[in-house]
């Protein structure tokens, strides 16, 4: 009887120890080497946000470049629009510093890109233009 009691006690201790080990291992699952917890859904969403921002910003850069080559932008307007794009890029880098762009951060970037898009449209169509040689066009 003592033997079976010892076996039961030993079995319960082993199971208890395994339970503690499993719980500890599960608690660290999903953490990186620095102990930071990763929410994989948030990470995937962040990747989608980043891709949307980059796509929009690339399109805006194309619009700025075409406006300059077509003579629809003055050099000052071109510099100002490029400065605005750099600020948006810096904002994105700042938001991505923790590894994830959150929904509110994406909204701020999206609004900044909306404003930049309107500025590009306004500057390209304000009839201040230069010809290919950098001289003012005749209608100015």
Image: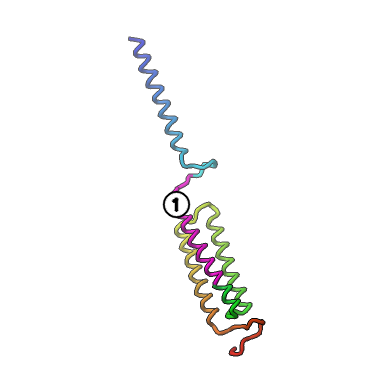
Q: Position of residue 6 (x, y in %)?
A: 37, 14
The single residue placed furthest to the bottom in the displayed view is 139
Residue labelled with disc 1 = 42
Question: In the figure, is residue 16 to the left or right of 114?
Answer: left
Q: Position of residue 76 (x, y in %)?
A: 63, 77
Q: Position of residue 9 (x, y in %)?
A: 37, 18
Element at badge 1? Answer: helix
Quadrant assignment, res 19: top left
Classified by dominant secondary structure, the portion drawn in magenta counts as helix
Residue at image x 57%, y 68%?
A: 85
Q: Is residue 6 above or below residue 126?
A: above
The single residue placed furthest to the left in the displayed view is 1
User: Residue 89 or 125: which is nearer the viewer?
Assistant: 125
Residue 32: in magenta span = no
Quadrant occupied by the C terminus: bottom right
What is the span of residues highlighted in magenta in the rendered image?
37-62
User: Residue 72 or 106: which is nearer the viewer?
Assistant: 72
Q: How is the image coloured?
A: rainbow
Q: Is residue 43 above or below residue 136?
A: above
Quadrant assignment, res 78: bottom right
Quadrant occupied by the N terminus: top left
Residue at image x 55%, y 65%?
A: 88
Residue at image x 44%, y 30%?
A: 21
Q: Is residue 137 above or below residue 116?
A: below
Q: Position of residue 56 (x, y in %)?
A: 50, 66
Dot 1 surroundings within 10 Å: few (below 14), some, or many (20 or more)? some
């Amino acid at each position: 009887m003592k033997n079976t009691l010892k076996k039961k006690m030993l079995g319960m201790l082993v199971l208890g120890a395994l339970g503690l080990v499993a719980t500890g291992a599960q608690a660290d699952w999903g953490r990186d080497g620095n102990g930071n917890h990763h929410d994989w859904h948030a990470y995937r969403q962040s990747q989608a946000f980043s891709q949307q921002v980059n796509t929009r910003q690339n399109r805006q850069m194309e619009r700025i470049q075409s406006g300059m080559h077509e003579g629809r932008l003055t050099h000052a307007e071109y510099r100002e629009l490029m400065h605005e794009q750099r600020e948006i890029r810096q904002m994105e880098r700042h938001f991505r510093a923790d590894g994830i762009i959150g929904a509110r951060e994406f909204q701020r970037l999206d609004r900044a890109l909306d404003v930049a898009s309107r500025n590009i449209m306004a500057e390209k169509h304000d009839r201040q233009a230069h010809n290919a040689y950098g001289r003012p066009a005749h209608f100015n």
